Structure formats: structure tokens, C-alpha cells
Image: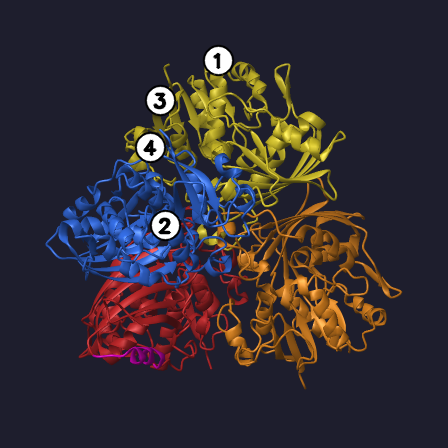
Chain colours: A orange, B yellow, C red, D blue
Amino acid sequence: MRKYRVGILGATGTVGQRFAQLLENHPQFEITAMAASDRSAGKPYSEACAWKLPGTIPENVRDIIVTPIEPPLDCDLVFSSLPSSVARETEETFARAGYPVISNSSSYRMDEDVPLLIAEINPDHVGLIEKQRANRGFAKGFIVTNPNCAVVSFAPPLAALHRKYGVEEVIVTTMQAISGAGYPGVASMDIMDNVFPYIAGEEPKVEIEAQKILGTFANGAIENADFTVSAQCFRVNVLDGHTASVRVNLKENSTLEGVVEAMRSFPSLDLHSSPKNFIEVTDEPTRPQPRLDRDNGDGMTITVGRVFPDNIYDYRFVALSHNTVRGAAGSAVLNAELLVSKGLI
Amino acid sequence: MRKYRVGILGATGTVGQRFAQLLENHPQFEITAMAASDRSAGKPYSEACAWKLPGTIPENVRDIIVTPIEPPLDCDLVFSSLPSSVARETEETFARAGYPVISNSSSYRMDEDVPLLIAEINPDHVGLIEKQRANRGFAKGFIVTNPNCAVVSFAPPLAALHRKYGVEEVIVTTMQAISGAGYPGVASMDIMDNVFPYIAGEEPKVEIEAQKILGTFANGAIENADFTVSAQCFRVNVLDGHTASVRVNLKENSTLEGVVEAMRSFPSLDLHSSPKNFIEVTDEPTRPQPRLDRDNGDGMTITVGRVFPDNIYDYRFVALSHNTVRGAAGSAVLNAELLVSKGLI
Amino acid sequence: MRKYRVGILGATGTVGQRFAQLLENHPQFEITAMAASDRSAGKPYSEACAWKLPGTIPENVRDIIVTPIEPPLDCDLVFSSLPSSVARETEETFARAGYPVISNSSSYRMDEDVPLLIAEINPDHVGLIEKQRANRGFAKGFIVTNPNCAVVSFAPPLAALHRKYGVEEVIVTTMQAISGAGYPGVASMDIMDNVFPYIAGEEPKVEIEAQKILGTFANGAIENADFTVSAQCFRVNVLDGHTASVRVNLKENSTLEGVVEAMRSFPSLDLHSSPKNFIEVTDEPTRPQPRLDRDNGDGMTITVGRVFPDNIYDYRFVALSHNTVRGAAGSAVLNAELLVSKGLI
Amino acid sequence: MRKYRVGILGATGTVGQRFAQLLENHPQFEITAMAASDRSAGKPYSEACAWKLPGTIPENVRDIIVTPIEPPLDCDLVFSSLPSSVARETEETFARAGYPVISNSSSYRMDEDVPLLIAEINPDHVGLIEKQRANRGFAKGFIVTNPNCAVVSFAPPLAALHRKYGVEEVIVTTMQAISGAGYPGVASMDIMDNVFPYIAGEEPKVEIEAQKILGTFANGAIENADFTVSAQCFRVNVLDGHTASVRVNLKENSTLEGVVEAMRSFPSLDLHSSPKNFIEVTDEPTRPQPRLDRDNGDGMTITVGRVFPDNIYDYRFVALSHNTVRGAAGSAVLNAELLVSKGLI
């Protein structure tokens, strides 16, 4: 089987490095283009990139010469982890030039003709692509996005509850890992022996993205889910793994057993990067923990624990996801696999 | 002026060490007795104690011979930081033997004839002492307590709001420091690169203590405040300083300015350990932070920040207190100063 | 091929858990017995063990009922990670009862009839087993040991230099990971924002074990290598991975290139747990780093970097190994594979 | 007494902030000018500076308007914590314009007519100022420097030994705090769960500065001490406090007691910032530790421990200093006090 040829936009960053790692032995995709800032362009990837993941740069990308971030690139589709300051313009340029753009950036997430995908939850939202092409005059290319890394930690259990009971209100307090800020990102003096109570732009994103993801696609458009989210977001001294402390009110009558069962039985997909379990629910009282649970399902499983009735809300629970795998590069790769399976790539 | 002679129960533990530090140059109290487990008894404090605070053991207690934890002790009152497993019986023994017991333990906090004090908030609750003596047949001694260290981080701003507007519901998510678990306490393998989602017995304490503290004392009894608290408690990789993420609903109409003003203007006391400001409200978007703000007011000030309207609740904010000073030994010392000022010691 | 049936002595500890992990899909060994302290005996392993490695307890050992640490055990050989307080007596009991004992404990390391093995360096030292059996009256069983985890970080590059040039003097300063102390092990208050300058019993072990490992086996005995080691050992705030800062004087003339080449070309073995490269030498100026390099070769490779001429000694370099894989359980498994390959198991 | 009016060059950086903190209530100096990069110039210090020390910006400097880094400044002398890239030219400009420049920068440390001072060790080196003025045509101004922060951790005990026995060779391995790199400085992803084996330019500085400091001043020049230093420098996950692991060979016969006594009895000075003890020697086996000992003597004491005979060298020990107090701003302030006491300011 011929592999799809892939370009990475923002190849030298933290998420770009995850793409290189996740695609090293991928059966459907192979990296053929690495695009990064002008400072890096012209150098082999191994020189341009300050590799921060364990081990060394994958052999198959070491010698790829980094190019500027502009079409044409020698590839069939692009994964983008561009900073939002440049993503809006650049990603449109690529889509217009005919490339499917699988974006991890926040720029287009809330545009009404752009799918905001968690492959297991709302795969039908890819139906927006047709409208997007019409709206924007894209002939062959398009843009799909995956959510903010903090949203990914609690949207899956929420989806399970929403599907079964209807969600009314959600209170979420996040404790987010330093890798979410990229490299150099969080200064060590800001996080050692500390909690940092502010992540620029994060709380608004967390408060709006879930309604779109759990929205319904009909007549060529998304109708957002009608619950409300309140978010407070903190950075904590953890390398990888965003933890969300969640309270939720449901619309219909429910039981604790029913709630746990809804999460546990939420189906995974049959794609290469799909974990065996999309959502794992643990009843160990001291779990989930980022260090022990972030790599569940090779970083693609959401781990939920401490599901209890709450004093004020119907339920409380703790949800955890790997922020640079399931919360970023891994979700984008899974989205690409979904698009291939649907014949859209 | 003669100083009151003080005994420390649980002298070698983390909070016991804080007592030694805070009382080193205290104008009203001097440590004359150090009581600890049988393993330590008979040794000089400097040998019995594995000192974990910066610097070295204060000179004035180095050579005190540690005694068993039983009366008589050579002192006028005792501070207790006993583990709850032994506190209930031991503290009663001391009260019955005539000692005022200023306890940091959880054993008696919710007993209806025992004051649960934050000196600035409910000093009138010392009125319970009379009833307590009658109930329990204490001739001269008595027990007063200070709250759980996590409660101390958010009860003060809550008190400010409750007094002005009435509090209806509170959602609190805590990120607590490792020193709260004492020594050896939290294993490094459990907290490095990690968030630990469980602190034994903590969530129930946090959900009930605030109502008593903010309750009203009348006719010799406390009527608890009638709001509800929902608490999720996490341990994070911070040495000192508990951070609370809070949402609150108020009973009466309010404004953001009025809320901030209520906190800022909540009066401090004129006691030796009182900070200049009981509650500081910062409008720096990245504060409070445990490392930078825990020592405000020598560890006795509560620092509040990020006070904003919330999507679901009336307001959200972040509150921080030093868990072993204001949240433990410092509060106990302040309580003792309050009792002296009221002629109860 | 029939697999050898393996028992783990000290199965619930940090190193015991690593054994369970490393043997989960091993082609030659399968765990059939889990022995631990009386407190754990009688429970399924999944209940007896507070699992501290990422993920969950391997399926194949979850339900094994933990037994007391005494023969007979239902197995062909035992891996021991017993604390040294009990290892000496218990390991002898097992050897006398006919079990090959592959020990990670320090008790027998320096006994002159017990091999202290790093499989790539001194596999011929297994020749001591014959003498050991004669000395101690073991019919079928025997004891082999692997070195202290800190020694394993620098002994391999030292072996490469010793074989080629002869080593004269070694100055080593170690920065050791918290997992080396087991669980609960290092208290978080002792290591957060800290360096701990003392590890009980460590410096003497580090100063004597290398000479035996690099010694020569002849006439049924080891003649220790005749260099001297000076060790200062520190605990640092790292989860896994011991870093050693090394200066070395060589006996014969050498060049920097020759030194690097000696390390790079030191052969690995052809056993299941052998890494592709026994020693990797990096010329990245900022490597090795524990977080990035400890998992090289699945934790079995020693990574060396910053090899330079020194101001006083001939050379300086930095060496890193994974302390609970190559420095403990992984080395023991490799030793067992070596013994199988030599027909001794 | 009139206070000397002080300007800070590089006022918004980590060391600049320490100057502001240390001079807040200084009896001899008051800050009247704050100079920083063009980006900050024109703003009040409280706005220009991202304060990273505990608490808030001292009141007395909050409203000082930051000026560009060029003379004239409204002050009698300047403290400089400029990055070395600009320090050489700028500090000369200030000296030429008549200002005493007390520099924490590395630019002039090894110039043969510039004193490299640790006030307790080589106060007579200020004699170089006369020659410096002659050489460089400075009328009234001059430059004095304090050493690299890592050197300050071990030079004091070395000075004690050198004065008594003569030092021949020194092996030092440093474990340095993140604050030494300023802000944002070390990326959190580089140091969490990690040791970073490289600090740009550090090892050469550590290998040459001690000889000048311990050199003798005679005939208007310094004759460097003739020992050799070998340095390996590491960054560890510690906020403040550089730890040095040291081995030393002495020229004359010595005893362990004599060595300890030499350190303990090394005299402190009678200046405002002098600690009671310049060098403290602890015999606690687990000390010094950065978290517990860096603030000894308000951060101005060097704490030494684990002094033992070494296997190869005469002695080994561990030395610790607070890198941004004694190792930077505090040493500079002490140097200024020394210069005032000698009538040079």
C-alpha cells in the first residue's frame, strides 16, 4: 500500500516533534516535508531541531532539509502545529493550494464551517468540509482541527454522559502540564515549587470548545450543545498529562453505576492510532495520576477516576489525558486516519 | 511582663517545628516543655528532632529534654499538633488536668462545644469554652481548635463575602502542598512529575468546617452557616502553600468591585502574630502563586487573586495561604494570643 | 521452547515491580511465584502491591498469590531484590534449597566466591560458581549478583578504558535518582528544591565494587583490578537515571579519539535483553540527560557524553544509566539470560 | 549619616531584583537610579520588572522611573549585573564617567588590574584600583568585581585551607541552582526530572577564578595562587543554592581536625552585610542541603559539611552557598561596604 506523504508545519516545536515520533513507523503516513521558521529553513531537521523527547530524532526524518512554511511542499497533506499568530493565514494558504490541513492550532476551531474533531465523538462533523470548500473556494484542500489540549481531558467523559443523559452544566478546574506551553515555554523559576494560576487565553477556549464538539451536525451545519462550562486553568509542575477536576449536572435521571458504565462503554474506533479503550475508568482511589496514567493506550486513552456523587452537582470526577499525544499530535494523526477511512484524503 | 510558659505536644513533627520557630522570639510565650512520642522522650530536642525547616533548631529549645505526652508538663498551656489517632484522648487528658489546649488536630473541630477559630473571623466563638467546661467537667482547662489547613485558604475570603452578601454555594478545588502531610509524609515517587488526586479524609473536612467557622454564636451555641461546599482536593508538587480554586454564589446582589472591597477591607487584629492585612487581593493576572505569595504577612496573610465573574457561578477566584503557618502553627499561636487578650489564658 | 519458571523475592518493591514489567513478555522466563513480606503473603499480587510504574500491573501476575519468602517456591530460579537486612540469610537458604539466586542485593557482592556480574564485562566470572558450590556445600543452587546501581553508571565506560589502556585512578561524583531508594523511599520534603548529600552506605560500595567487576578470573578466583576509586554520592530530584561525573587517569598513553572509540566499540551481547549498543557516546554538548537518555536501549544502554581532557586527570566524562533497569532488574534478567546461554540454568 | 546614592545597571533581572531586596533597608546605601534595557526605560520599576522573588517589589523602588543604561545616572556608585555581552563596554563607560562600578558580571574578573573580591578573603586586592586608574585613565571611577557564583561556593573553604596548609589541587563538581541562569533562564522542560550537564562558559570560569582570588597582592599586582582546579558543572532542579562536591590535595601535613578548624575559624568581617560566621562547618551527615542551608547568615554564610579523608585526595567535602545572595548581589553589596570602610567610595 502506498503511504500518504505528509508535511509538518511547525516541525521543530514540541508538537512537531511528537508528530515525528508518532509517524516514525506509521502504516499509512510517511513524513516527506518538514517546514519551520526561516531560522531553521535550509538545515537538516536533526540540526534545526532541539529534540526534547526521550531518545533521539527518528532516523527517517534526521536528514530531511527543513523548508520555509509555504506551499508547495512535497507531500499529500499537512499536519500543522503552528502558533496561532501565524496559523490563520498560513493554513488557509495551504488549504487553498490544495492540501488537506490537519491542524492542532486554535485559529479555525470555532469557525462554523471547520470541523473540530475528536474522532471517536463527532466523526460526522467532517461533513462540514463540503460547506467549507464552497464558502471559501477551496478546490481540493480543506482544514480540520482538533481541540485545545485541556478540553480533550474532559470532553470524552462528558460526551459519554451527554449522549446518555444530556449535560446541563460543567465546572472544570484544570492542572496542566508544562509541555503544553512548548519549548522553551514555561520558565523553570515560574513552576518549580509552584502553581501558576494563569495560562494565556486558555479559560475561554476551555469554556467554548466542548459545546461545538458535542454539537449535532445536520443540514450542513453544527448546532452546539446547550450546556455551559466554567473553567479555571492552572499550570502545575508536571511534564506531560493534563488533569481536570470536574463537576457535572445532567439533564436526566442517572445513577453512579450508569455514569461509570456510560464512560466505560463509549466505543473506540478501529483505526491505527485508536487505543483499545477510549475511556478507562479506574476505581483505585488514588488514580488517575499523570505520571502513571498519561501513557495509557499509548497516550491515546482518557483515564477517569474518583467518580462520586457531589455535594452540589450531580457528580464529580477526575479526568486525565496526555496533552501532547491525545491532546495534540496524536489526535491530529487519528483525525487524518479518520479522513482516510472516509475517503476524504 | 512575665511570659506564658508553653508546652508543645507532638514537638518533633512538621507543625511542632513550626511552633518552635514561631515562638522563638515571641513576646508573650516561651517554650518550656517539648512532648513527643516515647521514641523521642528523654533526648534533648536537638537530637530527637529531624529538623526540616531552613536553618537550624532555635537555640532556646535545643536542650529541652523531650518528655512523654502526658500531664503534668512544666507549662501554663499547650499547643497540640498530635495526629488525630491519639489527639482525642490525649487532648482531653490535658484539658482535664487544667491546661488550655490550643489544638491544630482535627479531633475536636466539629464538637459542638469546641470553638473552631480563625481569630479574625469568629473570635466570639470562644464563648463556647464556658459551655465546654460545664459539659465536660473541665475545671480550668479547655480545648480550642483551628481549622484544616485547606479550609484556611478559602474561608477568609468567604467570610468577607458572607458577612456582606451571604454565601449560598461554594465549589472549591484545592492544590495542596506536600508539607501538609508532615514528614516523611508524601513519598517523592508519588509527587514528582505528578498530581496526586487523593488526600485521606480531606474532602469531607473541607466540606463541613467552613459552615461552623462562619456560623453565629448565640445562646451559648453555634448555629452553622447554611451554605453548601463541594470540595475536590489534590496534592501538588509544592513545598508550602495551599492554593484553592473557588466559585461562589452569593445570596444578595453584588458587584465585582464590592466583592473585592469586601475582601480587602476585612479587618485584621491587633495581636502580635496578626498580619498587616488579613486578606490581600492582587490584580496581577498571574498571582497568587505559592512560591511568591505564601510568605505574605510572614505567612499569616491570605492572598486572593483572579477575582472574576464566572460563567455559572457569581464569581470565581484563587486563594492561597501558607499551610503550616496560617494553616497550622501560626493560627494556633494567634488563637492563643486572642485567648490571652480576652483573659481566658 | 519451555520457559524457565521464575520466582521474585521482594516482589512488591520498586525493583520487584520492574522484574514483573521486564518479564511480562520474556521469551525465556515466566513468573510463577511472587514472594514478599508476611504482610503481603496470601493476597493476590494486584492487591499486595502498590504499583508505582506507569500503567497497570501486568495481567500475567495480577492473580498470583503472594507467598512468604521461603523455599519451596514453585519455580526453577529466583530473582532477589530483598533488602540487605534479610538478603544474606534468605538468599543462602534458597541457594541451599537448590535454586539459582540472581540477586540485586548487596549482601554477597564482595564475597570472594560470588560473581559480581555485568554480563558484557565479566561473563567469565560465572566460573566462580563451581568454587562457591564447593565452599558452601550448595548442590544445585548458587548465588550471582549484579552491582550497586551507581556503579553500573560508570563501570562500563571504565571497563572499556581499562581493557584498552589500564585504569589507574577514578574520581566519581554521582547524582542519583529517587527511585534508587525504593518506595516510599525518599521523602518529598527531603528532595524537592534540594540536593541530598548523603545516601546510606553508598560511597563505600561505589568505591569497591568496580575493582572486582573489572578484575580477572584465573585459577578459580578473582584478582581485583588495582585502581582506586573516590566516590561522593548525592541524591537529586530525578525519578530514574543515575548520572556520574567522572575523572579518570589511565596507565598507558591515550588519545581522546581512542578513548571515545574504546567506549563506542565495547561489544554488546546477543541475549534477549542486550541493547543494540552497550555504551553510546554522544557528542551533543548538553547530553546525557536522565530524562532524555535513561531509556536508551530500553534502559539497558549506558550513555556517555562530555568526554574531554581534564585539567588534572587524563579525561573527564559524564555517564548515565537507568538505575532500576540496567542498574537493577534489567541487569539481573540479563545475568539470568547469560547463565542460561552458558548452561548454568 | 548621609546614605550613598546607588544606581543598579540591569535592574530588572534576577540579580537586579536581589539588589533591590538587599538594599531596601540598608544603612549606608539607597537606590536612586534603576537602569535597564531600552524596552524597560521610561516605565516605573514596578511596571518594567517581572518580580520573581517572594513578596512584592520594595516600596522604595516601585516608582523609580527606569532609565537607559548610560551615564549620567543620579547616583554616587553603580552596581552592575549586566549580561557579559554588554558589560565590558558599558562598565568602562561608567568608570570613565567617574562612577565606582561594583560589578557582578564576568567581563573584567580576570583583567590583571581589576580586583576580583571576596571581601573576607582578599580585601587587600582593592590595592589594584590605583593601578587600574593609571592604566585606563580613570580619574575617579573604577571597577571591582565579585566571582562567578559557583566559585563562591568552594573558594572560601579553599581559602581557609590555602592559608593554613597551601592548596595543591582541587577537583570540584558543582550542582547549580536554576536561579543562576536568570529569568526566564532555564526552561522547565530542561530541568524537571532531570540533570542538565552543561552550563555555557561555566567550567573554564570555575577553573581559573579561584587562583586569582587566593593570589597575593604585592608590588601593585596579583600573583595567582599556583594550584590547579578541575571543574565539571551541572544544573540541578534547585531554586537557589549551589552545591559543590570537592576533593582537595594540600601542600603541608594536615589533620581532619585541623582542616575543620581552619574553616570554622576563618574570620568574618565587621560590615553590615557580613554574616556572623563566614564559613559554618556542620557535622550532620545529611547536611549541607540547599533548601535548608542556603539562607544561613541571611544567605551570606558558606556552609560546609561531610568533611572526610578521601580515597585518593587528602580530603573531600561538600560546600554550599546562596548563588544570588553570597554568589551575586550580596557579595557585591559587601564589596561596596568594604570599599566604603577603606575610604575608596
- For disc 1, the marked residue is B343
Q: Check disc 1 and report its element: helix, strand or loop.
A: loop
Q: Residue furthest left?
A: D253
Residue labelled with disc 4? B58
Badge 4 local density, few (<14 within 10 Å), some, or many (20+)?
some
Where is residue B137 shown, x and y percent of the image?
Answer: 50, 15
Q: Amino acid at mark 1?
A: Gly
Q: Nearer the viewer, mark 1 or mark 3?
A: 1
**How crowded is the residue under tag 2: few (<14 C-alpha within 10 Å), some, or many (20+)?**
many
> Going from the N terminus, do you reach mark 1 or mark 3 first?
3
The residue segment tinted magenta is C253-265
- Which residue is located at x 40 percent, y 29 percent? B9
Q: Position of residue D266 (x, y in %)?
A: 20, 43
* Mark closer to the chain start, 4 or 3: 4
Dots 4 and 3 on the same chain: yes
- Please tell me whether mark 2 or mark 3 is closer to you in this view: 2
Cα gap from disc 4 to disc 3, whole angstroms: 20 Å
Disc 4 + disc 2, Cβ < 8 Å: no
Amino acid type at mark 3: Leu
Q: Which mark is residue B73?
A: 3
Q: Secondary structure at mark 2?
A: helix
Distance, label 2 to label 3, CA atoms, is 65 Å
- Labelled disc at residue D95: 2
Do marks 2 and 3 share a chain?
Answer: no
Q: Residue placed at 17% from the left, 48% from the top?
A: D259
Q: Label 1, label 4: how many angstroms apart (C-alpha)?
A: 29 Å
